[in-house]
Image: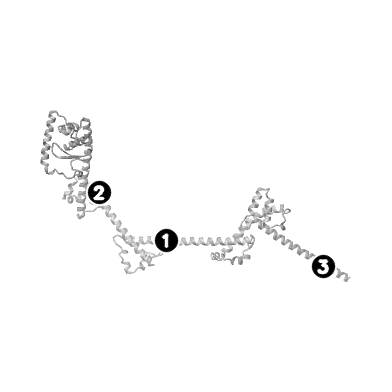
Amino acid sequence: SWQTYTDQNTGKKYYSNGATVTWTRPPELGPDESADNSASNKRSSASENESSKKKRKKGEKDDGCLYANKAEAVAAFKGLLLAKDIAPTTKWNDVVRICAEDARWEACNTIGERKQALAEYQTKRANELRDVKRQEKVRAKEAYQRLLTDILPTVKTFSPGSSRFMDVRDFLSKDDRFYAVDDETTREELFYEFVEEMRKREERNKRSKKREAKDAYLAFLKLREEEGKLTFASTWASFISSLGDEEKNDSRFIVSANMSESDRQLYFSDYVIELQNAEDEKRRRIRDARRRAEKAQRDAYREKLREFAKLGTVIPSTHWRSVEDKIASDPCYEPVLAQGRDVPMEIFNDFVDDWNEQYRRDRSTISRLWESSKKEIKLDESTGVDFSKKLLDYSANSPDIYADIRRMSSNEPLSSIMLFFNELKANAGVNSANRRSSLLNDEDSSEDEGEIKEDGEEAE
């Protein structure tokens, strides 16, 4: 807690909380009730000082009852140093000479304690003095800058970009604030710093005004775009011709100190380029959407061709003309036809060509296997599934052929084995029809020959 002490030499009060010593009364102690009795306090302090001196002369020792603890005693010693205005650079011998006669000198019992307290005091005091000096410089600089702010704008010949310190020194030196900074070199440096900051501030203000003028101009263009007078295809000449007299005299559009004619045309060009970019992006998205839709339509058309293939309506050897009417009746045909008159036929031809090429590659393998196994496989007693299974069973001893037959039995849209089976069945049907036709022809020939003989006999 704070305690009040009185300097025995001067009678002036100082205050300490055991760690800090100050001449200023702390708020925690409240108002000084003894202010009115200062005269008596001084007399009392003087008598105490005299008594202390007499005791020291008589060799009497202070029993230490004046200080509650060591920290308070050290604070009292530092208070002595503060009262004697001991500088941070004062040597020990000089401190002894100045302070040794004071009773508070004995607050520290040993020389080591006194030197330690002195070192702490001088360090703290040096920092305080530096802070004071720094604050003085800050106040001096602020006063000098206020002087520059007040005087320079009134000097007609002053220009932030070209004026020198000596050009305006006479105007500044008439004010007391000019001498707040005591060094001429510092004054000049502060002047040029102030002028540079002023120049930058003016440039910022100028850029800000130009930006505001540009924003207002772009807002004007936006309104004309909404009215349809400005599009991505507009030129400067066509845009000017579309404006009325009132619009041409609009404060946002006319040439000013913050927007030149070239600025207007440049901003206009940039705005139109943005419109063109937006139009290009819109068209690109429309094209992409159309391409995706057309691809989906073609994919649906191909899927329908696969369904026709599974039903047997389309086979690898089918020609477009033979199935065109059948395919054209399906709903998926018209969207593909809208993409181009020949697009449905081209997709169909690509479909059957790819399928036919795959079948030709597979047919040679299936044909060889059939030739070697047809004695064991009865074609007229089999279905397509049975035929495929029998070929798999027959090729089981050959891993490579078995893998190929297994793949061929699951081909899309119709397996190559099923196509081959249908081909065999068709050929068998044709051969059977041909044999029946041949037998009928032979019977007719025999009857004719018999009739001829009979005629011949009658002729004879």
Residue 249 position, x and y percent, is: 31, 67
- The residue that mark 1 highlights is 278
In this rendered view, identify the residue nearer to me: 311 or 209: 311
In this rendered view, identify the residue nearer to me: 411 or 222: 411
Residue 5 position, x and y percent, is: 17, 38
In this rendering, the answer to whether 115 lies above or below 199 is above
Residue extending farthest right? 460
Q: Residue at x 70, y 59 (%)?
A: 425
Q: Is residue 412 left or right of residue 213?
A: right
In this rendered view, identify the residue nearer to me: 207 or 381: 381
Residue 382 position, x and y percent, is: 70, 57
In this rendering, the answer to whether 254 lies above or below 3 is below
The answer to whether the residue labelled 3 contacts the one labelled 1, judged by CB atoms less than 8 Å apart, is no
- The residue that mark 2 highlights is 193
- The residue that mark 3 highlights is 447
Dot 3 amino acid type: Glu
Residue at mark 3 to residue at mark 2: CA–CA distance = 136 Å
In this rendered view, identify the residue nearer to me: 239 or 436: 436
Residue at mark 3 to residue at mark 1: CA–CA distance = 91 Å
Q: Is residue 457 left or right of residue 166?
A: right
Residue at mark 1 to residue at mark 2: CA–CA distance = 48 Å
Q: Residue at x 11, y 37 (%)?
A: 44
Dot 1 amino acid type: Ala
